[in-house]
Image (cartoon, helix red, strand yellow):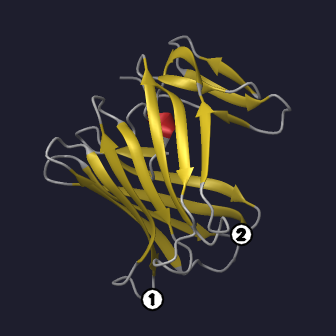
Amino acid sequence: MYNYDDSGRLMSIIDNTVIPTVTSYAFGRTTMEYDSQGRLSQIENLIEPTNNNPVLTFYYRTTYDYDANSNIVAIKKYKVFKSDPAHPFLQEDSKLTYGSTVFPVKIDTKINDGSQFDPELDFTQEYTYSAGNVVEVKRTDRPTHYNGYNTYTTSQVLQYDDKPNPFYGLIIGSPDVSTFSKNNVIESTRLYTYDTNGLLSKIALRDGTSETTYEYESY
């Protein structure tokens, strides 16, 4: 469930999600804060197990920094322990670089596990745009203990439909390439259904193991 303020800004998301490895169900609440210019400045995500399962001892906080043009230039995700909220652990650190588009052409990311000085992952993603969509993602992984201190480079070519992407420009967490493109990414392993307005209404795996449905508000 999505909740908005009087200005139409997204303020919270409430989610009841099945998480078999944690509990039968978990109650998730995501809250947003905005700066004086109306820009998203912070997101907090709290998951509370139900059915008498142990309450988690931490939650996540994501912060956003902007340049003079109001482009997001840094996204930091922290693991915040309820016993010591004043000293959160920096778990993910992303720096965004822009070219001639309103969306980033490069993102440098470090993901930490036990130590912020020896990251689990350290990589760069470079984006090639065409007709308002990211058509290629080139990823370079720098040496870390996770990959055996080797360097890897991979490339992914993306295909799109001709329908509007309802998540275009929507930032609600870590950088996500699916929000940088005006159309919807399509994959051969999935089936796509659209409503009468041309908006994505369902994505289903062809093998029938999973499906996601979307509903939209009227304005």
The residue positioned 57% from the left and 23% from the top of the image is 200
Q: CA distance from mark 1 to mark 2?
A: 21 Å
Most distant residue in the right direction: 207
Amino acid tagged 2? Val
Residue located beneath label 1 in the image: 83
Which numbered marker is on residue 2?
none
In the picture, residue 83 is in which quadrant? bottom left
Residue 67 versus residue 8: which sits nearer the camera? Answer: 67
On the rendered structure, is 66 left or right of 109?
Answer: left
Residue 104 versus residue 180: which sits nearer the camera? Answer: 104
- Look at the picture and state if 121 lies above or below 73: below
Residue 135 versus residue 87: which sits nearer the camera? Answer: 135
The residue positioned 59% from the left and 57% from the top of the image is 151
Residue located beneath label 2 in the image: 22
Residue 90 seen by the camera = yes
Q: Pointer 1: residues within 10 angstroms few (<14), some, or many (20+)?
A: few
Q: Pointer 2: residues within 10 angstroms few (<14), some, or many (20+)?
A: few
**Residue 78: x %, y % from top left:** 43, 70
Mark 1: which secondary structure? loop
Figure label count: 2
The residue positioned 28% from the left and 45% from the top of the image is 5
Mark 2: which secondary structure? loop
On the rendered structure, is 134 left or right of 211?
Answer: left
